[in-house]
């Protein structure tokens, strides 16, 4: 069913450099959440902090009652078993074939027999569409296949939480669309909590239940997809619509002169909110909310043309 991650007042610095401070959010159990932010705002640092690879300076990360910021190494080891992580490049061992790569966590962390391992590896390879490619070496396959192999490996211990660090980096738009569909289908099947760091605005607009935005050393906003896609907050609006006009400049914040120069420029109207990507079998995910529900419940009028199922670009279909 997935477990929630309660992040409270989290801060992280390296030396004197504050990466982010006062980050508070709950990543809801079983839902798909995306974390966005300009380059260097500490999205990867956040993921590493959530699995205890980095210690925060302040604050807590509570998972099933354990604060991983302060718990013992032994408790951390147990909590980590709840996680599956898809690293940016798939993080495959180059000298092992895909089968052995995917089997690796099972051989390391369980006492399962080789025949049990075989059943699990083949099930996960099937889940990510890689049956038949078990004997290939990571260097012999495309980037998209490597990501899927990394995903199969992230899934072998049946995680309650899956972290994706830029799953779409280096993929062309078609492969990104396939991977996004796979992520949605997987969430429907395994019901785990998904947290995805991405730069891809189309992914952020169509895949998740929730969106967060890290900007200028803090969490600018985190909430349901429709809340952020209908938000007039300048940073959120600029980032989610990939616009130049707004507070975010080439190197983080614009200075006063730059902001003054564009003060009379109108922000373009908010684009329509696209339909959320559905599982390919057409059966809604457990955590999926009906289109427009958040807007209706909060008295927000979505931009004209929102939730039009025919917008093929926006749905990635
Ligand atoms: N172990 C470390 N020691 C010192 N500084 C670090 C360390 N890890 C990350 N940083 C710094 O933290 C900042 C945030 O890095 P991070 O990789 O999390 O950014 P990001 O938002 O994921 O960026 P991108 O979108 O470009 O991948 C960077 O300035 C980076 O140099």
Image (cartoon, rainbow, N blue to C red):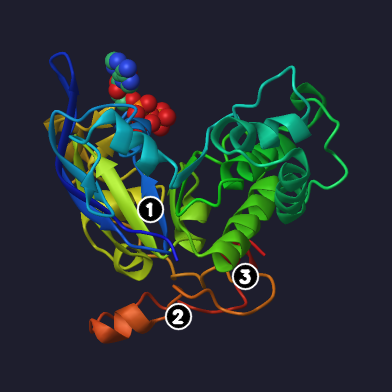
Q: Residue at x 23, y 84 (%)?
A: 299
Above-or-below relation of 6 to 215: below
Q: Is residue 111 left or right of residue 138?
A: left
Assess whether mark 2 and mark 3 are in contact (beta carbons under 8 angstroms).
no
For the residues carrying marks 1 and 2, which lies nearer the camera in this image?
Answer: 2
Seen from the viewer's position, the closer of residues 158 and 312 is 158
Q: Earlier in the sequence, mark 3 or mark 2?
A: 3
Q: Which residue is mark 2?
A: 291
Q: Nearer the viewer, residue 108 or 222?
A: 108
Q: Which mark is residue 279?
A: 3
Instruction: Report if the CB atoms under discs 1 and 3 are less than 8 Å apart.
Output: no
Q: CA distance from mark 1 to mark 3?
A: 23 Å
Residue at the image position 60 percent from the left and 60 percent from the top? 186
Q: Which mark is residue 220?
A: none
Tell me the element at label 2.
Answer: loop
CA–CA distance in space, label 1 to label 2: 18 Å
Q: Looking at the picture, does residue 96 appear above or below residue 117?
A: above
The N terminus - image quarter: bottom left
Identify the residue under disc 1: 240
Element at label 3: loop
Q: Residues within 10 Å of mark 1 (few under 14, many from 20)?
A: many
């Amino acid at each position: 069913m997935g477990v929630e991650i309660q992040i409270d007042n989290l801060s992280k610095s390296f030396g004197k450099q504050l990466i982010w401070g006062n980050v508070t959010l709950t990543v809801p159990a079983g839902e798909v959440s995306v974390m966005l932010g300009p380059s260097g705002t500490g999205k990867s640092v956040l993921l590493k902090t959530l699995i205890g690879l980095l210690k925060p300076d302040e604050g807590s990360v509570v998972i099933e009652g354990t604060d991983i910021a302060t718990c013992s190494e032994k408790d951390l080891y147990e909590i980590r078993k709840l996680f599956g992580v898809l690293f940016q490049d798939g993080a495959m061992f180059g000298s092992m074939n895909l089968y052995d790569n995917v089997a690796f966590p099972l051989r390391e962390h369980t006492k399962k027999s080789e025949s049990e391992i075989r059943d699990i590896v083949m099930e996960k390879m099937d889940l990510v569409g890689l049956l038949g490619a078990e004997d290939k070496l990571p260097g012999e396959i495309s980037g998209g296949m490597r990501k899927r192999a990394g995903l199969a490996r992230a899934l072998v211990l049946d995680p309650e939480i899956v972290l994706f660090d830029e799953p779409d980096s280096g993929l062309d738009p078609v492969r990104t669309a396939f991977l996004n569909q796979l992520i949605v289908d997987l969430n429907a099947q395994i019901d785990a909590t998904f947290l995805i760091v991405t730069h891809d605005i189309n992914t952020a607009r169509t895949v998740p239940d929730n969106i967060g935005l890290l900007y200028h050393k803090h969490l600018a906003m985190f909430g349901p997809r429709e809340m952020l896609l209908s938000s007039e907050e300048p940073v959120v609006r600029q980032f989610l619509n990939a616009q130049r006009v707004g507070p975010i400049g080439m190197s983080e914040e614009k200075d006063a002169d730059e902001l003054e120069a564009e003060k009379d420029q109108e922000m373009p109207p908010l684009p329509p909110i696209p339909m959320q990507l559905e599982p390919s079998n057409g059966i809604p995910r457990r955590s999926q909310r009906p289109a427009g529900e958040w807007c209706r419940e909060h008295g927000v009028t979505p931009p004209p043309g929102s939730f039009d199922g025919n917008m093929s670009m926006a749905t990635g279909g």
